Image (tube, grey):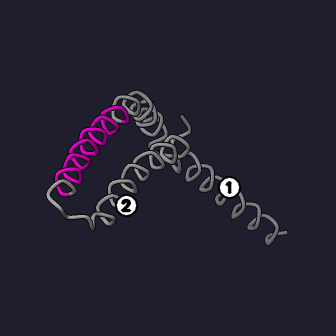
């Protein structure tokens, strides 16, 4: 009988400790939700800014390729592919980040 009482005491203490640990095991949930709302609020503005920067750099890259072509440098394939794939990268990353953040 003494062993049974001792087991009940140990189980009660363990249960109380687990309850205290589980209550304190989720710190930062409110901070997570506030950060999530911040990401949602800033995402569209930042994505538009990145696309504008990408458009400006694409125009400048196109002008650079055009001047190189006009100056007689006809081996501009690597430059054209570089600018094309950088624009493709910006577009794909926008879609990827939108799916990652669930927007």
Picture quadrant of residue 60: top left
* Residue range highlighted in magenta: 47-68
All told, the count of numbered labels is 2
Q: Which mark is residue 4?
A: none
Q: Quadrant of the C terminus?
A: top right
Mark 2 → mark 1, Cα distance in angstroms: 64 Å
Main SS, magenta region, reads helix
Q: Taking 32 as reference, is 13 left or right?
A: right
Q: Nearer the viewer, mark 2 or mark 1?
A: 2
Residue in the image at 35% along x and 29% along y: 45
Residue in the image at 56% along x and 43% along y: 99
List the residue tagged with mark 2. 81
Q: Taking 64 as reference, is 85 left or right?
A: right
Q: 59 or 40, which is in the foreground? A: 59
Please tell me whether residue 60 is drawn above or below residue 14 in the rendered image. above
Q: Which mark is residue 15?
A: 1
- Based on the picture, tell me whether residue 58 belongs to the magenta stretch: yes
> How far across and how far down the image is residue 98, in percent?
51, 40
CA neighbours of label 2 inside 10 A, class few (<14), some (14 to 19), many (20+): few
- Based on the picture, tell me whether residue 86 belongs to the magenta stretch: no
Q: 6 or 65, which is in the foreground? A: 65
Q: Taking 47 as reference, is 73 left or right?
A: left
Q: Helix or strand or loop: what does disc 1 sit on?
A: helix
> How far across and how far down the image is residue 11, in percent?
72, 61
CA neighbours of label 1 inside 10 A, class few (<14), some (14 to 19), many (20+): few
Q: 57 or 48, which is in the foreground? A: 57
Please tell me whether residue 57 is drawn above or below residue 12 in the rendered image. above
Instruction: Kindly give the residue lying farthest to the left in the view shown.
Output: 71
């Amino acid at each position: 009988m003494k062993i049974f009482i001792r087991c009940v005491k140990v189980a009660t203490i363990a249960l109380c400790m687990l309850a205290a640990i589980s209550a304190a095991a989720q710190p930062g949930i409110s901070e997570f939700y506030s950060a999530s709302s911040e990401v949602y609020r800033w995402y569209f503005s930042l994505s538009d800014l990145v696309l504008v920067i990408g458009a400006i750099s694409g125009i400048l890259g196109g002008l650079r390729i055009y001047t190189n072509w006009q100056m007689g440098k006809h081996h501009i394939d690597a430059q054209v592919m570089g600018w094309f794939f950088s624009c493709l990268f910006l577009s794909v990353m926008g879609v990827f980040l939108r799916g990652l953040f669930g927007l």
